[in-house]
Amino acid sequence: MVSRAGFASLLGASFLLLLLRGAEPLGFSHRPMTAGDELSAAPSRYLTREERWMSQRLDHFSPTDHRQFNQRYFEFLDYHDDPTGPVFLRICGESSCDGLPNDYLAVIAKKFGAAVVTPEHRYYGKSSPFDSLTTDNLRFLSSKQALFDLAVFRQYYQVGQEKLNSQYNRSAGFDNPWFVFGVSYSGALSAWFRLKFPHLTCGSLASSGVVLAVYNFTDFDKQVGESAGPQCKAALQEITRLVDEQLRLDSHSVKALFGADSLTANFMWPNQLVFSNFTIFTSLPICFLYMQLKNDGDFLFLLADAAATTFQYGNPDALCSPLANAKKKGESLVETYAHFVKDYFIKKLGTTVSSYDQEYLKETTPDDSSSRLWWFQVCSEVAYFQVAPKNDSVRSAQLNTRYNLDLCKNVYGEGVYPDVFMTNLYYGGTSIAASKIVFTNGSQDPWRHASKQNSSEDRKVLIYCTLSSLGDSSNCTSPEAVNTVRKQIVKHIDLWLSQCHEPTRSGSGTPSHSMAKLCSDHELPFTPLWLREVARLPSGSSHR
């Protein structure tokens, strides 16, 4: 089942699946997904699920803290025929990493003869440093620590005992060309890794890379409305109005209609009280006080996510067509939407209702659920608060800044606050000053507003089309459009790997004469530039 922590890993990975399969829907949300019928990887769809382990430092920023934890990783070497060939580092993001998926990255790896490795993100899955995820123990969970994990892993895998250099009997100074890949949050990590460690990677693919930390992310809701189109947007707004009204009258019944009656209301902190025309607190009726203190944001967040997911997947007809039919027949929009939430969002995608409960987020026992972990990163570093715009919002006005801040305080206690200014100052936001990065974003993906939108000389942005409401962009996922994106990605990977290659005196391992012969253009339909260069190098050269 899928946790509330969201859809980052699999929805972001749907971009890779789209490129692999042609015209499949795609999209992503920053919340991680761990299962889900459409995009989950069954065991047969993994390149490998064989676990490997390394010892990782807990705190990279303390010279006196030498504590270690076990970090899980996976490797796939079947395509790595040339020992001097590239290594593709797939960054596993904010969810359990249970293997190397057999998706489009595998296609690229085979094309380039690359090894593929992926370390699990600290704290997630089986890579938890602690047996209890208390707020105090979560202080080492951050993107900054994760980037150093990747750097340490990269060096460990290159020069560590029984790793690449020792396996091929090479000197410690030999370096294979590395390239990093990521989607959604891990897409941001991919870009940030290239920014902070340019000497450790030849380039980066940041699919839906959310490099801009956003405090009040109103553009998310605005994009949902735009992607829905006028009629579907109006229907969703009417549903929001009716649900808000029913929550005031009989909250249990309307929640039960959506299969979410387990989600109870939270109570706002005292500074949220709205006293209306009353001036004396003691004169307020009890029922009025209750209504002012009550907040059903958890339930309303579930409903908002359900709608947003269809546009992130590029599958708006699953939602908008039933609503249009219900409107035409005079049927209940709320009941129609409830059927969609239960049948599609909960049943088909495997979303767990309980993971939208703040009490669930307080659970400190490590397991495969990523919700508490990702929300800590949201509350302490990047925010991405998906709040309702003041005007013309699709989601309920109860989903405001106060709701998000109260969630952070309720779940993690005092002192946990997302300083997005410092995050963007550290990484640069969309003005990231790194080179050789490909950013890819879906045209209807609400999260593209937290990613880089415009290309520069050494930072290529590819906007790929996804379907808007009722098929208005029917040609967006055509094979031709997909192939164009594919070719652009391969072109830049090929170019940057070739530029990363330089002859040195440190190593050995030039391909044999027979291997060089196989690398000629007429022998293979695609010959990577780096391999052509290797075939021309004198004996004793290597990559660096």
Image (cartoon, rainbow, N blue to C red):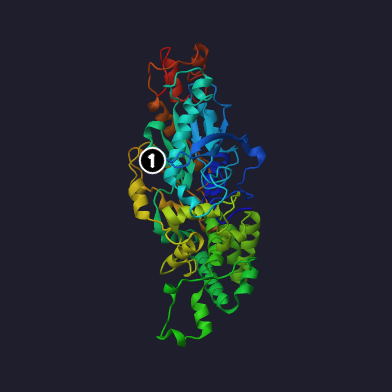
Up the image or down, 380 lies above or below 240; here it is above
As displayed, is residue 344 above or below residue 146?
A: below
Q: Secondary structure at mark 1?
A: strand
- Residue 103 visible here: yes
Whether residue 357 is visible: no
Which quadrant: the C terminus?
A: top left
Residue at the (51%, 66%) spot, across then down: 231
Q: Position of residue 526 (x, y in %)?
A: 50, 26
Q: Identify the amino acid type marked 1.
A: Lys
**Residue shown at the point (48%, 54%) measured from the top left:** 376
Q: Is residue 291 above or below residue 370?
A: below
User: Badge 1: how crowded within 10 Å, few (<14), some, or many (20+)?
Assistant: many
326 shown above or below 71: below
Kindly indicate the quadrant of the structure image that contains residue 388.
bottom left
Task: Please tell me which residue lies in front, 268 or 20.
Answer: 268
How many numbered marks have been drawn onto this rendered protein structure?
1
Query: Which residue, as the protein is rendered here, is positioned at the far front?
Result: 64
* Location of residue 144 in the rendering, given as x and y in whole percent from the top left corner: 41, 44
Extreme residue in the bottom direction: 283
Foreground residue, 141 or 28?
141
Is residue 233 or residue 406 the one in the foreground?
A: 406
Q: Toward the viewer: 292 or 90?
A: 292
Residue 229 x, y percent position in the rendering: 49, 62
Q: Which residue is mark 1?
A: 460
Q: Residue 433 at x, y = what percent?
A: 32, 42
